[in-house]
Amino acid sequence: MRIRKIMSEPVISITSEDAIIKAADLMRRHAIGILPVLESWCPVGVITDRDIVIRAVAAPERTLDQPVRAVMSPDPISCQADQTIAEAAAVM
């Protein structure tokens, strides 16, 4: 089976320059807990609802108007829609 058969579409994403609060709002509106972070259509990181809580809300030095890059996890590993599920699992 290919990744395409189990992935969600459309992909909701954010840029590293967008505010953390925008990421939280997108997650709330789309009922999701993770967003890919893109720069020039290339993935540069991911931000999760947990990243927002632990690295922004609970961190006194952070504010929600800071850019996503301040709390995202960099260097994501990704796969292609035409790869098999077994191939994607092996990468994980």
Image: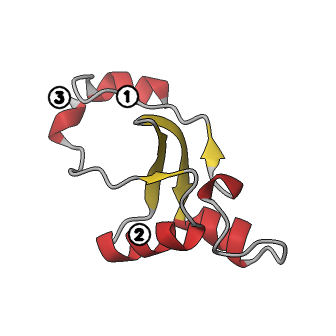
Left or right, 21 with reference to 74: left
Mark closest to the chain's N terminus, 1 or 2: 2
Q: Position of residue 39 (x, y in %)?
A: 49, 39
Cα–Cα span, label 1 and label 2: 22 Å
Viewer-proximal residue, 53 or 23? 23
Give the residue pinned by disc 1: 79
Q: Position of residue 6 (x, y in %)?
A: 21, 43
Assign the N terminus to one quadrant of the image. top left
Cα–Cα span, label 3 and label 2: 28 Å
Mark closest to the chain's N terminus, 3 or 1: 3
Please state which amino acid type lies under the numbered disc 2: Met
Q: Is residue 43 above or below residue 60?
A: above
Q: Is residue 22 above or below residue 35?
A: below
Q: Secondary structure at mark 2?
A: helix
Could you tell me which residue is drawn at 63 percent across and 47 percent down?
A: 73
Label 1 CA crowd tier, 10 Å (few <14, some 14–19, many 20+): some
Kindly report which numbered mark, 1 or 2, lies closer to the viewer in this rendering.
2
Label 3 CA crowd tier, 10 Å (few <14, some 14–19, many 20+): few
Mark closest to the chain's N terminus, 3 or 2: 3
Q: Is residue 41 above or below residue 12?
A: above
Q: Quadrant of residue 84?
A: top left
Viewer-proximal residue, 46 or 70? 70
Please state which amino acid type lies under the numbered disc 3: Met
Please state which amino acid type lies under the numbered disc 1: Cys
Q: Check residue 1 in the rendering and tell me which mark sits there, or answer none.
A: 3
Left or right, 64 with reference to 59: left
Q: Check residue 27 in the rendering and tell me which mark sits there, or answer none.
A: 2
